[in-house]
Image (cartoon, rainbow, N blue to C red):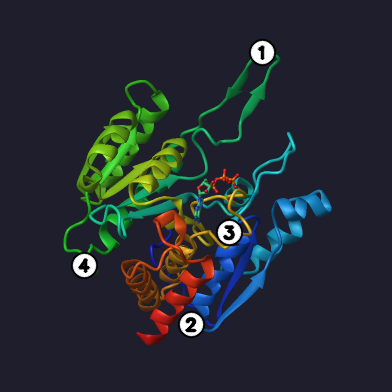
Amino acid sequence: MKTAKVVNSMNRVNPMKIAVASGDGIGKEVIPAALQVLDALSLNIEKVPVEIGYGKWKRTGKAITNDDLDLLRSCDCTFFGAITTPPDPDYKSVLVRIRQEFDLYANIRPVKGIGKGKNINFTIVRENTEGMYSGIEQVFPDAVHSTRVITHKGSERIAEYACLLAREDKDKEGDRRTHPKRLTIVHKANILKSCNLFREVCISVADKHKVPWEDMLVDATAHRMVLDPERFELIVTTNLFGDILSDMAAALIGGLGLCASANIGENYALFEPVHGSAPDIAGKGLANPIAAILSLAMMLKWYGKTKESDAVHDAVAHVTAAGITTPDLGGRCSTMKVADAVTAAIETR
Ligand code: ATP
């Protein structure tokens, strides 16, 4: 089975081309802040702006068009901000559409404490295309049936990706690991037959790759994650469970403003901060840009620019340790002040 690589090592002749979709709300603030950091790396990267989201929906009646999808397709990957959900009962999520259109089956969410919870360092690998978000729903007058779809293929490829990460990811010191990370397979197989399939496939893939594994019920995982988050190294789970656990994990390390993510497919990827458009703080310069900046670092790593990706991580660690933070982390700095400090840290290093 072909599996997308952690580092995308496709041989490329042309410069990297990224679609930039900042979207709505604080997406419009954190994405330009992150792009300033990207510019400090002096890489030959073409940026293609793409307008999608609520703002576009208000203007044109559509949040995303086929032309927008073609524009995204013409690039190597997308750097995405956030989208406010339009108040339309027939509205279908733009992000879910992009994930399905490009078959971005692996959602990767690193959970790494910077100040708060600095010993927490694990990654959640979430299946991104099926489960409770299959999109199969039947609405009856007095009931709604949402279909949870778990397939052998979907479980196998996410387990393959998780095993790849278990072997290729770096440890806390940044050295190449000699031992694979322990994989925690999270499910609810005592109740759901679909989870039984997921669990069994994940176990057989982990055994095949000689990746050490344990399995854990999702409720027990939530409990242990609050009590002892340092014990986790790598989690693989289904769509809805991964969605919930990763937001909970964000709270353990200081909030959504720090959490980056990648949506990975065979030939395409989308990188985005985990947070949404946060209308309550939009336009005030209060948004923490670190999640977007770390998403950028994930993009650089995926593209094979590992040295530059590490430089961004180092600069972020330096800036947060110096207390240059936005109010969500207890600081007094604006979005751009934090971005300026990260940019300066890259330039001086
Ligand atoms: P949406 O409807 O787009 O999902 P939301 O406000 O419901 O937006 P989030 O954007 O994920 O959901 O944010 C939840 C809360 O977390 C926000 O109200 C905001 O105060 C806070 N928050 C989210 N992202 C950031 C950030 N980057 N910096 C500071 N605070 C943030």
Image position of 32 with respect to 216: above or below = below
Q: Which of the 4 image quarters holds residue 52?
A: bottom right
Q: Position of residue 103 (x, y in %)?
A: 55, 51
Q: Which SS class for mark 1? A: loop
Q: Is residue 260 visible?
A: no
Q: Which residue is mark 2?
A: 40
Q: Position of residue 196 (x, y in %)?
A: 35, 28
Q: Amino acid at mark 2?
A: Ala
Which of discs 4 and 2 lies nearer the camera? The answer is: 2
Quick check: marks 3 and 2 in contact, CB under 8 Å? no
Q: Amino acid at mark 3?
A: Gly
Q: CA distance from mark 2 to mark 1?
A: 56 Å
Which residue occupies 36% across, 55% down? Answer: 110
How many residues crowd around disc 1 within 10 Å: few (fewer than 14), some, or many (20 or more)?
Answer: few
Q: CA distance from mark 3 to mark 2?
A: 20 Å
Q: Is residue 48 left or right of residue 36?
A: right
